[in-house]
Image (cartoon, rainbow, N blue to C red):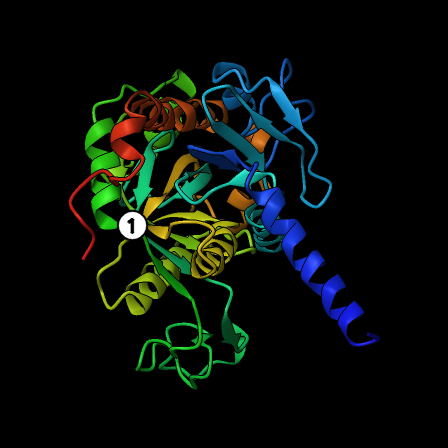
């Protein structure tokens, strides 16, 4: 009898979560943003505010085990703020994925936030759909003042002894995230002709750059991301980012945007997918350019860094607008045709 009682209690405890999960709220889309400035509505916006106001995310849900309260509308769109940086993003997304209130097994995930952009590929205010996201934090480093003369950088792949030493990565490191290319292509085709905001201040800023893409009016493109918690600036680090992404993707990826959180978010989603709680084939990353990742000719990287800051970026508000304007097209399409997309992911089947 003494043995049977603990076993019975254990069975009851194991059964309780299963019963609670039968009443989970089915979520169609999760919009993941990284920061908000002040309130969720009615003041100077961060990445979350336009989604809250324009998608009518009127229901606020407590989220004490995450960074910021959740917001939801009647159509099954759930919005979240992860907090800035890889650690907060990973923790908040994992917390949401394990939250017994929600059924996320069929949910699409749209990570939508601002970023720096490589002037070789795009202009401020532009919006880039990423197929590859590469972790820029997992590494070894030697101070640049002490590196051998034949080294291009002091940043070395983890468990390697020289820059870009083959093979690219160990199997036990999830340093490269390859999103469903069919879904990414579908999202790009759906949005490539979306008109993006432009301003005289942005026109003036991009006029100082020589690259043709940097001088273009804002546009929608496909472009890959490096995700690292260190905010960096300069032409040499831009070269590192391009090389790092090529190295870790076997030459398949092209660095376009630099952001902080997405490797953490995607790491959590990949673990949740292994547990059957989310579907990694339904994940999209959209980053919009608030600033260039380097200064124009004639300005130093240190000067550019000194002039950085949300309130100083001519592309800040337009990039927030672009994230919603482009992302909304995808969100609206999925919600409108949910019966089609419930069991069939858009685009051709991923290989």
- Could you tell me residue 230's position as x and y percent? 56, 56
* Mark 1 closeness class: few <14, some 14–19, many ≥20 residues within 10 Å: many
Rendered residue at 26%/41% (across/down) = 345
Rendered residue at 34%/33% (across/down) = 127
Q: Which residue is mark 1?
A: 131
Res 165 quadrant in image: bottom left
Image quadrant occupied by the C terminus: bottom left
Residue at the front extreme, as displayed: 1
Res 276 quadrant in image: bottom left
Q: Is residue 285 left or right of residue 32?
A: left
- Could you tell me residue 335's position as x and y percent? 35, 24
- Could you tell me residue 288's position as x and y percent? 40, 35
Q: Is residue 307 visible?
A: no
Image quadrant occupied by the N terminus: bottom right
Measured along the vertical axis of the image, is residue 94 above or below residue 203? below
Judge by depth and name the residue closer to the eye, 198 or 135. 135
Q: Is residue 333 left or right of residue 13?
A: left
Judge by depth and name the residue closer to the eye, 187 or 152. 187
Residue at disc 1, secondary structure: loop
Judge by depth and name the residue closer to the eye, 53 or 145. 53
Rendered residue at 33%/31% (across/down) = 126
Measured along the vertical axis of the image, is residue 220 above or below residue 317? below
Q: Is residue 52 visible?
A: yes
Res 202 quadrant in image: top left
- Could you tell me residue 82's position as x and y percent? 59, 42
Q: How many marks?
A: 1
Q: Is residue 18 left or right of residue 338?
A: right
């Amino acid at each position: 009898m003494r043995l049977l009682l603990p076993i019975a209690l254990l069975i009851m405890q194991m059964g309780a979560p299963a019963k609670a999960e039968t009443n989970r709220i089915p979520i169609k889309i999760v919009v993941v943003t990284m920061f908000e400035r002040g309130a969720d509505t009615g003041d100077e916006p961060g990445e979350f505010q336009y989604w809250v106001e324009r998608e009518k995310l009127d229901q606020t849900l407590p989220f004490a085990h995450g960074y910021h309260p959740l917001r939801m509308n009647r159509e099954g769109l759930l919005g979240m703020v992860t907090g800035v940086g890889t650690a907060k993003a990973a923790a908040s997304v994992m917390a949401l994925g394990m939250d017994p209130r929600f059924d996320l097994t069929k949910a699409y995930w749209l990570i939508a936030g601002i970023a720096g952009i490589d002037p070789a590929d795009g202009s401020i205010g532009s919006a880039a759909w990423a197929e590859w996201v590469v972790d820029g934090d997992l590494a070894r480093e030697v101070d640049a003042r002490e590196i051998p003369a034949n080294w291009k950088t002091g940043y070395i792949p983890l468990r390697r002894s020289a820059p870009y030493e083959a093979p690219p990565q160990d199997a036990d490191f999830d340093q490269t995230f390859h999103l469903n290319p069919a879904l990414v292509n579908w999202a790009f085709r759906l949005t490539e002709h979306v008109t993006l905001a432009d301003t005289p201040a942005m026109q003036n800023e991009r006029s100082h750059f020589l690259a043709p893409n940097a001088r273009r009016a804002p546009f929608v493109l496909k472009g890959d991301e490096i995700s690292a918690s260190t905010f960096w600036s300069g032409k040499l680090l831009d070269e590192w980012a391009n090389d790092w992404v090529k190295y870790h993707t076997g030459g398949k990826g092209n660095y376009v945007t630099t952001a902080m959180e997405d490797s953490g978010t995607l790491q959590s989603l990949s673990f949740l997918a292994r547990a059957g709680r989310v579907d990694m084939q339904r994940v999209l990353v959209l980053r919009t350019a608030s600033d260039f990742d380097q200064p124009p000719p004639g300005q130093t990287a240190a000067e550019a860094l000194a002039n950085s800051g949300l309130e100083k970026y001519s592309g800040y508000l337009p990039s927030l607008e672009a994230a919603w304007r482009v992302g909304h097209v995808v969100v609206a399409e999925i919600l409108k045709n949910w019966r089609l997309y419930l069991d069939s992911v858009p685009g051709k089947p991923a290989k």
